[in-house]
Image (cartoon, helix red, strand yellow):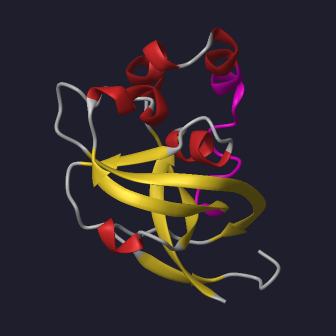
Amino acid sequence: MIVPVISLWMPWANWVVLGWKDIETRLHKRFYGLKGKKIAIHASLKWDDTAIEQARPYLRDWQIEQTNFMNRNKFGGAIIGTACCTTARELTDEDSFRALIDCGTVKRQGLVLAYPKIVKAIPCRGKQGIWYAEMPEEL
C-alpha cells in the first residue's frame, strides 16, 4: 500500500508517534491535502536542539526526561509510525498544548492527527513536503 509521508525532525517525530503531539504544525497550508488520509511519519536524521525548550511549557517533567534519554540516531532516517489526519486548519492559542509549541503568537497551520501507531522502523531517506512510500499492508 502506498501512503503519503511527511518528514519531521526528531524529537518532534517521536512525540507524534508516542501520541504526545497530536497536532503537527507548519507555517504554510501545503499539507491540507492530507485531510482524511492515513499518513506515515518519517523521523529525519536531524535532531532539533531547540525542541525541548520550545515544548517545555507543554510537556510534563517525565516526558522531558524520557526525551533526553532518546537515542538521537537510532531511528533517524526511517519511517517510525503512522497516524490519521482528521483535519487541517489554522491554529489558535488553545491548540498549543496539543501541538507542543506556541500557536498564539505565531500564525500556524496544523494537521490534527489521531490514532498514532509506532511501526517497526522502515529505513529510508526523507524529503521535504509530501512524499510517498510503500508500506506493508498490515499497517
Where residue 1 appears, as percent x and y from the top left, is: 67, 89
Asked if residue 78 is among those painted magenta in the image, a careful observer would answer yes
Tell me the quadrant of the picture where the C terminus can be found. Answer: bottom right
User: In this picture, is 78 found above or below 75?
Assistant: below
Given residues 89 and 125, the one toward you in this image is 89
User: In this picture, is 137 found above or below 84?
Assistant: below
User: In this picture, is 83 found above or below 58?
Assistant: below
Q: Is residue 124 left or right of residue 107?
A: right
Where residue 64 appears, as percent x and y from the top left, is: 61, 18
Q: Quadrant of residue 32?
A: bottom left
Q: Which residue shows up at 29% across the image and 54% down it?
A: 89
Asked if residue 123 is among those painted magenta in the image, a careful observer would answer no
Q: Is residue 31 left or right of residue 119?
A: left
Q: Which residues are magenta?
A: 66-79
Q: Quadrant of residue 100?
A: top left
Q: Quadrant of residue 31?
A: bottom left
User: In this picture, is 48 found above or below 66?
Assistant: below
Q: Which residue shows up at 17% across the image and 39% down it?
A: 107
Where residue 80 appears, as percent x and y from the top left, is: 67, 58
Q: Which residue shows up at 68% across the image and 42% down it?
A: 18
